[in-house]
Amino acid sequence: MADLVTITQALAAAMPAADAAVAAVQSTLPSIDVAETTRGSVAIGKGVAYGVAGGGAGIGIGLVVAATLNGMARQPEQAGKLQTLMFIGIAFIELVFLFGIVLTFILK
């Protein structure tokens, strides 16, 4: 426990020196346009959101279709009902996907 206290005290004593070093380095760097950086971050975020929404919808639809085919193979007489429920499930998955896409357009 004494070692932890010693390390903490050493780090606390080194903080002002680290702040001065960071300030010295920052003064030599060219200024960065924050608006440009923010636009780039938003574009990356939108791309990630598109990917996650599309991937999630693809996985969801695949699972629904697989479960429907499994049900049809087990009980062929229920194929009509299962197919109807499958299309309803796919519609809901696509709805959630479209909400994800719309939310990416709302981001600024």
Image (cartoon, rainbow, N blue to C red):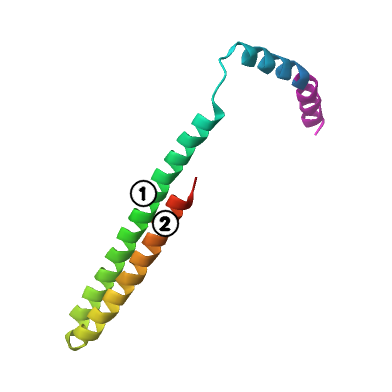
Please tell me whether mark 2 sits on a helix, a strand or a loop. Answer: helix
Q: Residues within 10 Å of mark 1 (few under 14, many from 20)?
A: few
Q: Which mark is residue 51?
A: 1
Indicate which disc, 1 or 2, sits on the residue closer to the N terminus: 1
The answer to whether residue 43 is left or right of residue 63 is: right
22 and 6: which is toward the camera: 22
* Amino acid type indicated by mark 1: Gly
Residue shown at 63% from the left, 13% from the top: 25
Magenta residues, dominant SS class: helix
In reply to whether residue 103 is colored magenta, the answer given is no
Residue that label 2 marks: 102
- Indicate whether 9 appears above or below 38: above
Rendering coords of residue 78 (x, y %): 22, 87
Please tell me whether mark 1 sits on a helix, a strand or a loop. Answer: helix
Determine which quarter of the picture holds residue 84: bottom left
Which residue of the protein is positioned furthest toward the bottom in this rendering?
77
Determine which quarter of the picture holds residue 45: top left
Q: Residues within 10 Å of mark 2 (few under 14, many from 20)?
A: few
Rendering coords of residue 71 (x, y %): 24, 79
Total labels drawn? 2
The answer to whether residue 85 is left or right of residue 75 is: right
* Amino acid type indicated by mark 2: Val
Rendering coords of residue 22 (x, y %): 66, 17
- Indicate whether 72 appears above or below 34: below
35 and 11: which is toward the camera: 35
Q: CA distance from mark 1 to mark 2?
A: 13 Å
Residue shown at 18% from the left, 88% from the top: 77
Determine which quarter of the picture holds residue 72: bottom left
Q: Which mark is residue 79?
A: none
Q: Write the start and end of the magenta stretch as one range.
A: 1-14
